[in-house]
Amino acid sequence: MQTEKFDNLVILLLISFTFIIIGAHHFALNKTITFDSQSNIRAYAVTDTANGGSSKAKLHTKGDSYLLDCHIVKSDYPWPFCEVTFAVGVNEKNELDTPLDLSPYTSAHIFAKYISDNKASFRFQLRTYNERYSSPTDDSTWKYNGIEYWPEKNTYPVEIPLDAMQVATWWLLEQEIPIAYASPEFDQVLILELATGNHMKPGHYQIEIERIEFSGKVFTNKQVFTFIIAMWVFAAIIGLVMNLYRSKEKLILLEKRAHELKQLNRLLNVKSQELKDQVERDPLTGALNRKGIEHVFTNEIKTLSLMFIDIDHFKPLNDRYGHNIGDIILKDFVKLISENCRSTDFLARWGGEEFLLICPNTKLLEANELAEDLRQLIAQHHFVQDIKITASFGLAQKENESVSALIERADVALYAAKAQGRNKVVISNNVDLF
């Protein structure tokens, strides 16, 4: 009887939780992204001059809004226009940077209007990138997802469902896009454009753009209902398992004990790993120490390259800024290299400001390329108190020699790098790079 009451309570809780999830999804759990004059997004005016037109436009701010002064001029170009462009995924050279994913959003809210009493339309466009047919440097290959609307015929702000947007037919024909890619895409947005509409009459227009907002749900309908179904399926499985094993309390007790022993064993393993780290890792930087890299030099690794890295002029830097700053630089130095080398490489502090980077299964050519990348990265990095440092690299590839001989050759190459003026990469000999 007690078990039955418990089961009924669980079912009641599941039903309540289901309604809570559905209600929260419908009435809350919204997300928005806004583009306005306060956003850290580059906005600029564009006209038809690139297409042979003569229109002029100037963009400036008015309070918290953008104000576009547009002069539509009749010319040989039949579709004169002015527009405001928000560069959300391109750099100042109009080249691919970091595309914006708007696919989770369902609608755009356009807070824009013509200040004068004209009845002109707007064109709202999202220019998107797809590596299957787009070029990072040719904006004519970026898809035109757009829609034209008349502000006077819509409530302010104008809400545009993203699924109402269409790909420009002229662009599909011009680029010869396959049917598979003819539908709108919003996962790699590079540019937002709000432009004057088609068939604009010559004259002066003023457009005030307060902001552009994209809204959507934190979770899609599919995700919510998938979660609900999974929750009920999971609950059903748990209920079945509980009914099967309620009569086997002794077995459950033994399983619980086994679980406790497993947890204890895990804790012991963690403690063992902590003790191992204390023995094999440098306490200041967290890099491996000399003992920690002993296991790397095994006969199983046929090809191995080694970098001897030394921070240039570290002692004067230490003397000038103090040992505390020096320690911070060493830790930051290790973090910088660790985050930019490969997961198969091993970084060890050899002593002071000297480090070894061991690269298993790596020829000298690969190691040299990695060393050059690291050298430039270090030289460009701003350390604590905006301190700039450089590092010298000595490289060697393991031949039929002892580990100490390999390290000595790398050390000799490092010495040569310093003798040549530091901030250099020097290879110890001319072995086959490939």
Image (spheres, grey):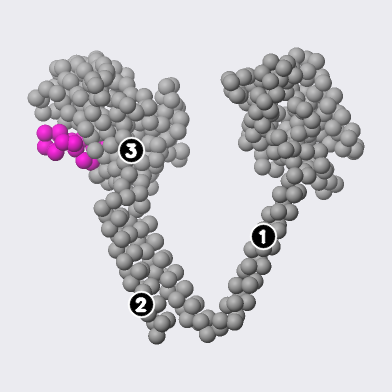
Can residue 77 be seen here? no
Question: Callout 1: 10 Å neighbours few (<14), some, many (20+)?
Answer: few
Q: Residue 255: where, in percent of width, then height? A: 61, 74
Front-lying residue, 305 or 23? 23
Question: Callout 3: 10 Å neighbours few (<14), some, many (20+)?
Answer: few
- Residue 342's quadrant in the figure? top right
Q: Relative to residue 104, is residue 35 depicted above or below?
A: above
Verify CB contact (< 8 Å) between mark 2 and mark 3: no
Front-lying residue, 3 or 221? 3
Q: What is the three-letter code of the residue carrying label 3?
A: Ile
Front-lying residue, 318 or 416? 318
Mark 2 vs 3, N-terminal side: 2
- The residues bearing labels 2 and 3 have C-alpha atoms spaced at a distance of 43 Å
Task: Determine which residue is flagged by label 2.
Answer: 8
Task: Determine which residue is flagged by label 1.
Answer: 266
Front-lying residue, 276 or 102? 276
Determine the residue positioned at 78% across, 15% down: 420
Verify CB contact (< 8 Å) between mark 3 and mark 1: no
Mark 3 vs 1, N-terminal side: 3
Which span is picked out in magenta? 146-160
Which label lies toward us, 2 or 3?
Answer: 2
Determine the residue positioned at 10% across, 25% down: 118
Instruction: State the SS at label 1.
Output: helix
Instruction: State the SS at label 2.
Output: helix
Q: Is residue 188 left or right of residue 380?
A: left
Q: Is residue 107 left or right of residue 357?
A: left
Determine the residue positioned at 31% across, 41% down: 32
Task: Determine which residue is flagged by label 3.
Answer: 33
Residue 234: say if magenta. Answer: no
